[in-house]
Image (cartoon, helix red, strand yellow):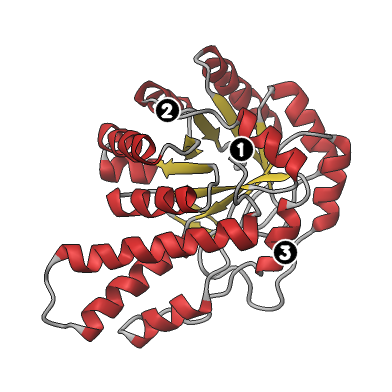
Amino acid sequence: MSLVTTKEMFKKAYEGHYAIGAFNINNMEIIQGVVNAAKAKNSPVILQASTGAIKYAGPKYLKAMVDVAIATTGIDAALHLDHGPDLEAVKLAIETGFTSVMFDGSHFPYEENVIKTKEVVEYAHAHGVVVEAELGVLAGVEDEVKSEVHVYTDPEQAVDFVNRTGVDSLAIAIGTSHGAFKFSGEAKLRFDILEEIQTKLPGFPIVLHGASAVNPDAVETCNKYGGNISGAKGIPTEMLRKASSMAVCKINMDTDLRLAMTAAIRKVFGENPKEFDPRKYCGAAREAIQKVVEDKIENVLGSANTL
């Protein structure tokens, strides 16, 4: 098997009222955990790497590990650039062999976002690669992406943006946020905005960023074994499942993987302070990631047995 674009994935997801999980990858154990889960649940998956991950692992190392993982499991997977900041980052990803890219121009003035996104679309499409863009601003911090404000996506503007840029999917802001501290009070997503965009852009795939549930058990385990993560709160599972049954075809989840991995490693060291074999704690982390992804596929995304 080889990597694919998200075009057919999203078409099937939209028509089947489910979403594809987009999981951030940084190393071998994360990649293995994600693809093993997708294989176990017979689900398509998107492996995505931020510019920070590409710098950390190296583009060729990352691509080679993904190629081996896909060939081993035989699943349908796309390799996606997450939050590409400029055309140069997009070009590097495409040259490396990514099948999907995101250009994030959401922090630019609207017209500048349109112009820059259209330039990326023209380049990517000429190389057979699909493009995701973003409209609206998510608050929070994750990797190299951060904002102190949240700006909801305007549905009318979303229609104009899609028509003028030619993007293949659009990340919108309806209340999700990056990082582990998404809400101080009651969680709320603007499903009215999502519904209006779906009505105005029928059949068009929508993306949710910052959609980790922030598992309380993982947070508790981290804290139990020496961590200091207080006040972490994510998106309720039922809200994400509702979104994935509508126009949302791709849901990004990074924080949940980080927490699962960290909790597993902390637990190994906490229970076995003499342990120094990386295979023991990295192996535990890989198993934890697989368990989390399997749960997401089954209970959040609804993408199990859709291959």
Query: What residue sits 68% from the left and 78% below the top?
Result: 185
Q: Answer whether residue 262 is visible to the viewer in this image.
A: yes
Instruction: Give, as a three-letter code, the residue at label 3.
Output: Met
How far, Cα to Cα, is label 2 from label 1?
35 Å
Give the image location of residue 89, x and y in percent: 42, 30
Indicate the quadrant where residue 210 lies.
bottom right
Identify the residue position indicated by label 2 in the image.
Answer: 2
**Mark 3 or mark 1, which has the lower sequence index?**
1
Q: Answer whether residue 149 is visible to the viewer in this image.
A: no
Give the image location of residue 137, x and y in percent: 65, 50
SS at mark 3? helix
Of marks 3 and 1, the one in the foreground: 3
Q: Residues within 10 Å of mark 1 (few under 14, many from 20)?
A: few
Q: Is residue 54 left or right of residue 279?
A: right
Q: Residues within 10 Å of mark 2 (few under 14, many from 20)?
A: few
Identify the residue position indicated by label 1 in the image.
Answer: 108
SS at mark 1? loop
Query: What residue sits 36% from the left and 87% below the top?
Result: 224
SS at mark 2? loop
Of marks 3 and 2, the one in the foreground: 2
Q: Nearer the viewer, residue 66 or 87?
A: 66
Identify the residue position indicated by label 3 in the image.
Answer: 239
**Mark 3 or mark 2, which has the lower sequence index?**
2
Q: Disc 2, disc 1: CB below 8 Å?
A: no
Give the image location of residue 121, x and y in percent: 59, 21
Q: Is residue 251 left or right of residue 159?
A: left
